[in-house]
Amino acid sequence: MSQPSADQILQIGMGFWASKTLLSAVEIELFTELAKHPEPLEPLSGRLGLHPRSARDFLDALVALGLLERKDGVYSNTPSTDFFLDKNKPSYLGGIFEMANSRLYGHWRHLTTALRTGELQNEASQGGESPFVALYADPQRLKTFLKAMTGISRGANMTIARQFPWKDYKSAVDVGTAQGDLITQVALANPHIAGTGFDLPEVAPIFEEYVQQNSIADRVKFAPGSFFDMPLPKADVVMMGHILHDWDLPTKKMLIRKAYEAVPAGGALVVYESIIDDDRSKNAFGLLMSLNMLIETPGGFDYTGAECVSWMQEAGFHSARVEHLVGPESMVVGIK
């Protein structure tokens, strides 16, 4: 019988120390600076504006956390931080950390209140405007946010583009397309697919720029609209990535029903997110994401694969299956 240990308890309980250290490193663009070239302590501290009292502990903490390397007193990025946290690389996913640092970190202080009330705890909880209304009203902020969504979704998008049997289909629509990376990856990996990105009109210029950059504008188009107010564009395959978890159960079922109506017999619905395992005991990220939906939305929540399969079958899909993608992400595929 193993002896009780406080190690895991301490690591999790004080985990905000490590989290905020990373978030601050992203905020001051440490990894972008080191992507230019490795640097010793003093010149690096000067470039970043770090105080002598804090600099060494801060940088060495990042070394101990596996986020920086240090050799002979010279600091450099790790391969992962160089790839994902350099603002000048298309693989940058620090935008999501910028948002976490400026917004979510503070809102999560009120998790206990959310747990006891079941109510969201973001700006809207204090009578303010929904952060997403303000976001969509500011083209530059919206572009930064959608780029961040691309960064955290890229691995799953590329896996779907390879793993799903696209040879059996000719067209696809990406619902809530954002910058358009999901339909872009599908089109790049499957030249016979004609694609559509469906989202609010404000997204159009950002989507179209991204599609142009990837040289697929002849096959991938934007369709403006709200999935609350109109039918989904018709296609052989409807895709929803990180969409359903934003909404309450009736809205989830409504969107699945609209997807059923948009595809022909033999067509498919592909839903993906951090799908919670059916036992609800292994995918900690998916469960924590659901708590984030509690903080951020009036009724959103994440769900198990079995739950999503049952909703698809209720809508009329004759079969549905769950397939793992990457990390905590999985997709649920329903066939009409």
Image (cartoon, helix red, strand yellow):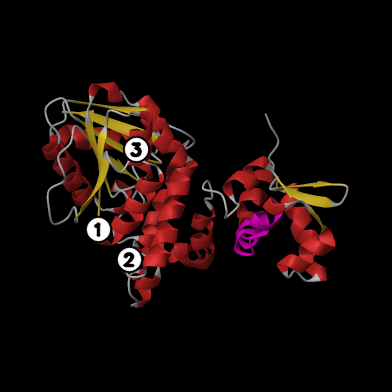
| Residue under label 3 | 304
Is residue 154 shown left or right of residue 180? right
* Precedes in sequence: disc 2 or disc 3: 2
Quarter of the rendering occupied by the N terminus: top right
Q: Amino acid at mark 1?
A: Leu
The question of residue 21 being in magenta is answered with: yes
Q: Amino acid at mark 2?
A: Tyr
- Residue at x-position 68% and y-position 58%: 33
- Residue at x-position 11% and y-position 39%: 261
| Residue under label 1 | 200
As helix, strand or loop, the secondary structure at mark 3 comes to loop
As helix, strand or loop, the secondary structure at mark 1 comes to loop
Distance from disc 2 to disc 3, alpha carbons, whole Å, reads 30 Å
| Residue 85 horizontal/vertical position (percent) | 59, 51
| Residue 288 horizontal/vertical position (percent) | 46, 49
| Residue under label 2 | 136
Q: Give the quadrant of residue 145.
A: bottom left
Density class for disc 3 (Cα within 10 Å; few <14, some 14-19, many ≥20) is some
Q: Nearer the viewer, mark 1 or mark 3?
A: 1
Segment colored magenta: 20-34
Is residue 107 shown left or right of residue 273? right
As helix, strand or loop, the secondary structure at mark 2 comes to helix
Determine whether label 1 and label 2 are within 8 Å by CB.
yes
Distance from disc 1 to disc 2, alpha carbons, whole Å, reads 9 Å
The question of residue 118 being in magenta is answered with: no
* Precedes in sequence: disc 1 or disc 3: 1
Q: Is residue 224 above or below residue 159?
A: below
| Residue 55 horizontal/vertical position (percent) | 78, 64
| Label ID, residue 108 | none
